[in-house]
Image: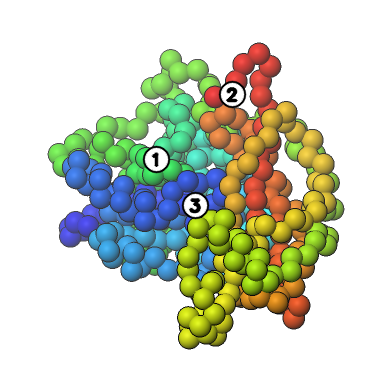
Amino acid sequence: MASDAQTYLDLHVHSSEGSDDAGATVEGYLRWVESRRKLGFRVDGFVLTEHRRYDQSRDYSELAAKYNAVVLRGVEVETEIGHVLVYGVTPEFLKRFDLSDISLPYAEVFRVAWETGGIAVGAHAGRPRIGVVEHFNERQVDLAGIKVLETLNGGSNDYENARAHDLARQHSLREIGASDGHFVSGLARCLTRFDYPIRTIEDLVAVLRDPTSSFVPLRIEETVEGAEIPPRPGLEELAALLPHTSGQGNLGGDAIEYDRSVIGREVHGGRLVVTAESIREYCEALEETNPLYLDPEFAKKGSYGGIIAPPGLLQTAELGPAPDPKVKFGNLGFHAGSRQEYFLPVRPGDVLEGYVSIKEVYEKTGRSGRMVFVVRQARFENQHGETVALLQNSHVQRELQAGGSND
């Protein structure tokens, strides 16, 4: 990371470690930062803003130091005026909101973020449905509590960014740029240049909250030494552009219909009896040779005091279906990733009860248009009543246009 006072940060990034629609690890992003620097671009770091999730225990400081970069953390939440980035997330803020709620009260989000020492920013402000511009134009929502908008977004098109810039200009709102990256190659397409050293989330929040501070959104090509940053065009300057959409916000239509009563309701899905033989057979099938799973004498000397099961063994359990949310949308479905958390070791002799549920149903957009995610969860409980693991699978439903594709 360069040593001068300026700092170039991508303020809106999603990783596979926290967002189920992302395909890049934090270290993968850091390696991409290295590659961008070798080409002469200036990227000092990024802020992870995972969707609807903020794990207070995560710490990337050592990994960031390894790559001489800044890795900070915020969160992206969903409100009734679109998506909102929150920086400076405090325990008090987390107590006030259920981050999994996809229609949080936007005025409260902005107000509580500010009152608890952070700041909220309207994300990809120019996109339909999930950006503030459309809600302001159509519903005249109050902008009084909004101080900063993301008006240069790497996933939005020129028209969407221009309409966001216009709104910010007309209402004296400050502007940031960010990639909204979900994959390695998306990182740092757009960034924000700060005329100060930013090393911590406190530094970032202080600058964004200070009305006299200096920062500017820009594209990565404008970070090269000597590059000029041209004036940001508004809609007047882009009069030739049609009011088309990137597809990432064009949800359209009515609210998705589904049975909300099943969300979070667990039903018994089945049982998994763990034996030394089932562990051995699983390991043989995968050519797994870890002695913690196979060698009693070796395992006895380890920290677990005996053989344990490979975490993947739980995925062999034959569980019944979760309650059906009856989502009324789409004519095409596909698997969209999984998330697994393991809390306690599983040993020979354990009898695990599997409880299945629908964790959440939410909608968002991609380049192919409107999508609905259904997240199914399996919770495994041992004979002592302890939860040993949570396994989640996400399924996407989307509308395939008749006579063609959405690609």
Residue 14 badge: none
Q: Is residue 194 left or right of residue 338?
A: left
Of residue 26 and residue 302, the one placed in the foreground of this image is 302
Ranked by sequence position, the earlier of labels 3 and 2 is: 3
Of residue 404 and residue 37, the one placed in the foreground of this image is 404
Which secondary structure lies at badge 3? loop
Residue at the location (68% across, 35% down)?
Answer: 333
Asked if residue 92 is positioned above or below residue 302 in the image, the reply reads: above
**Image x and y of residue 370, in percent:** 64, 33
Tell me where residue 389 sits by quadrant. Answer: bottom right
Q: Residues within 10 Å of mark 2 (few under 14, many from 20)?
A: few
Residue under label 2: 406
Residue at the location (57% across, 77% down)?
Answer: 307
Ranked by sequence position, the earlier of labels 2 and 1 is: 1
CA gap, disc 3 and disc 2: 24 Å
Q: Are marks 3 and 2 in contact (CB under 8 Å)?
A: no
Residue 186 badge: 1
Tell me where residue 255 sits by quadrant. Answer: top right
Q: Are marks 3 and 1 in contact (CB under 8 Å)?
A: no
Of residue 270 and residue 339, the one placed in the foreground of this image is 270
**Image x and y of residue 230, in percent:** 27, 32
Q: Callout 2, which amino acid?
A: Asn
Ranked by sequence position, the earlier of labels 3 and 1 is: 3
Which secondary structure lies at badge 1? helix
CA gap, disc 3 and disc 1: 14 Å
Tell me where residue 66 sits by quadrant. Answer: bottom left
CA gap, disc 2 and disc 1: 21 Å
Residue under label 3: 16
The C terminus: image quadrant: top right
